[in-house]
Amino acid sequence: MKWLIRIVGAAIALAVVIGVYLASLDVNQYKGEIIDLVEAATGREFSIHGDLHLKISLLPTVAADGIVFGSARSAAPKNMVTIERIEAQLAIMPLLRGSITLKRLEIIGGRISIDTDRRGCCY
């Protein structure tokens, strides 16, 4: 019986340590890396003008303010997408296995500009 109490105590202590670490984590330190990844994957300018936010719960939520995604170089509008705030709520079990599953995606205050070429192709 004592071993069970020790295991439960260790699990609770580990959960507290992880919770304290995540609560003190400044997710804004990853802004540069996120911007670089999006630009490398798309070949377009990308920026996050505001802050990144992380809310720890059974459904963790990641939010970002001031998102701007650039248009193709030949497109008329400079920015294809501007978003005041975006929030993504994640499923925790897939996250623990290393994959991301969105439970909810909310875009607040967005604008999308789609340009087409002479053949009607969007870019």
Image (cartoon, rainbow, N blue to C red):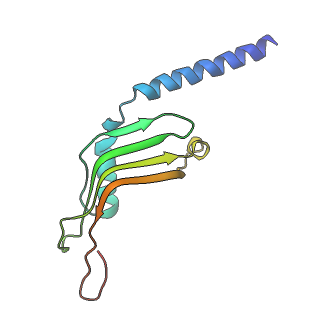
Left/right placement of residue 20 relative to residue 40 reads right
Q: Quadrant of residue 119?
A: bottom left
Residue drawn 65% across the image and 18% down it: 10
Above or below residue 38? Residue 56 is above
Q: Nearer the viewer, residue 110 or 88?
A: 110
Across and down, in percent, residue 47 comes to 25, 51
Residue drawn 59% across the image and 18% down it: 13
Q: Quadrant of residue 33?
A: top left
Above or below residue 20? Residue 34 is below
Q: Residue furthest bottom?
A: 119
Across and down, in percent, residue 114 comes to 28, 73
Q: Nearer the viewer, residue 3 or 102?
A: 102
Location of the N terminus by quadrant is top right
Residue drawn 70% across the image and 19% down it: 8
Left/right placement of residue 57 relative to residue 69 reads right
Above or below residue 118? Residue 57 is above
Left/right placement of residue 100 relative to residue 51 reads right
